[in-house]
Image (tube, coloured by chain):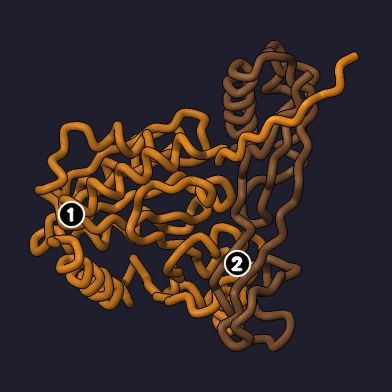
Chain colours: A orange, B brown
Amino acid sequence: MQEPRLVEVRKNVLKANDVVARDLRERFRKASVFVVSLVSSPGSGKTAFLEKILSLLHPQCRVAALVGDLATENDALRLARSQAPVKQIVTGTLCHLEAAMVQNALQGWDLNDLDLLFIENVGNLVCPSSYDLGESLRLVLMSVTEGEDKPLKYPTIFNSADVAVLTKIDLAQAVEFNEDAALANIQAVRPGMQLFKVSAKNGEGVRAFVDFLLSRTKTLRPATTV
Amino acid sequence: MHELSIAMSIVEMAEQEAQRHGGRVAAVHLKLGMLSGVVKEALLSSYEMASADTALAGSQLIVEDVPIIVYCPSCQEQRQIKSAQWFCCPECGTPTSEVVQGKELELVALEIQ
């Protein structure tokens, strides 16, 4: 029997996704759209938070949202109440969004009409970490009801994100949430990570987050108009 | 559980490469970073499923684990960390988020017979 020969390949397995993500990032840059993706476990409040942000931003800023879900269009219906353009991406059985799904969902939208685009991923703290969607900023959300050790259990997704958002802080006392421990855990897996504490229910902290986004959008502008 | 779709991508890429080189693929060598977001055990069992009924049926997936290496701004050195739960320099303790290595998900080579 012939001895096997070794053939070098050296290719990124997710190259197909990365190529689409790179194209998307370039399109976003050219159209000066700041793109924010949201990842979290199911039920941590991505949609409620986004609903609040969209309603605060919509009149003053041209915003839109893409929202991923396995089976329903419920989230898009909720977000559409803000009057901002919203599209649902139904992934079927797929547990995460891929760049090509974002690309398809953007068909029919002129990116030049947008300042900010939100992409809400499928609720999942594992799979989305491997897929670049061409976003400018990745938020990882964690609710106080989930327990303080979420970052330690899912270090890869926290590490892949740029900013952490602690949600449902109006419930912190009721669930005896240990904020210091949670913050220490976030810093352990992603030192220096910026954190926002918000409640979509009573609005606490949401304005500060929106101001942060607007400052990032503006800082992006001069660099992209070259 | 996205390992199955990743295994399918690996099979597809390996099939294309094998076609270019001719011959039967005996093994596929993969580099898998600790921060790739992919679970090795799940990938190995997914690979068996994904390669069945393809030209790669019966081939072996050989996974090389790639540890996480960070850059320590205090030591100004690259350091390997043992755990994804503690991003700090193992020598001086300085926290660091600068990942140099560990996100790999790379098809490195094929063994062709």
Q: CA distance from mark 2 to mark 1?
A: 30 Å
Q: Are marks 2 and 1 in contact (CB under 8 Å)?
A: no
Q: Quadrant of the C terminus of chain A?
A: bottom left
**Pointer 1 local density, CA inside 10 Å: few below 14, some 14–19, many at least 20:** many
Q: Chain of mark 2?
A: A
Q: Amino acid at mark 1?
A: Val
- Give how far across and how far down residue A99 sits, in percent: 39, 40
**Pointer 2 local density, CA inside 10 Å: few below 14, some 14–19, many at least 20:** many
Q: Residue at x 63, y 86 (%)?
A: B75
Q: Chain of mark 1?
A: A
Query: Is residue A136 visible to the viewer in this orientation of the structure?
Result: yes
Residue in the foreground of this view, choosing between B22 and A91: B22
* Residue farthest along the right direction in this orientation: A1
- Give how far across and how far down residue B113 sits, in percent: 79, 18
Is A114 above or below relative to B42?
Answer: below
Q: Residue at x 70, y 40 (%)?
A: B30
| Residue A16 figure quarter | top left
Q: Amino acid at mark 2?
A: Pro
SS of the residue under disc 1: strand
Q: Residue at x 66, y 14 (%)?
A: B22
Q: Which mark is residue A63?
A: 1
| Residue A19 figure quarter | top left
- Give how far across and how far down residue A69 sits, in percent: 42, 39
Left or right: A34 with respect to B16? left
Left or right: A89 with respect to B5? left
Q: Quadrant of the N terminus of chain A?
A: top right
Query: Is residue B1 visible to the viewer in this orientation of the structure?
Result: no
- Give how far across and how far down residue A207 sits, in percent: 25, 75
Left or right: B12 with respect to B81? left
SS of the residue under disc 2: helix
Q: Which mark is residue A151?
A: 2
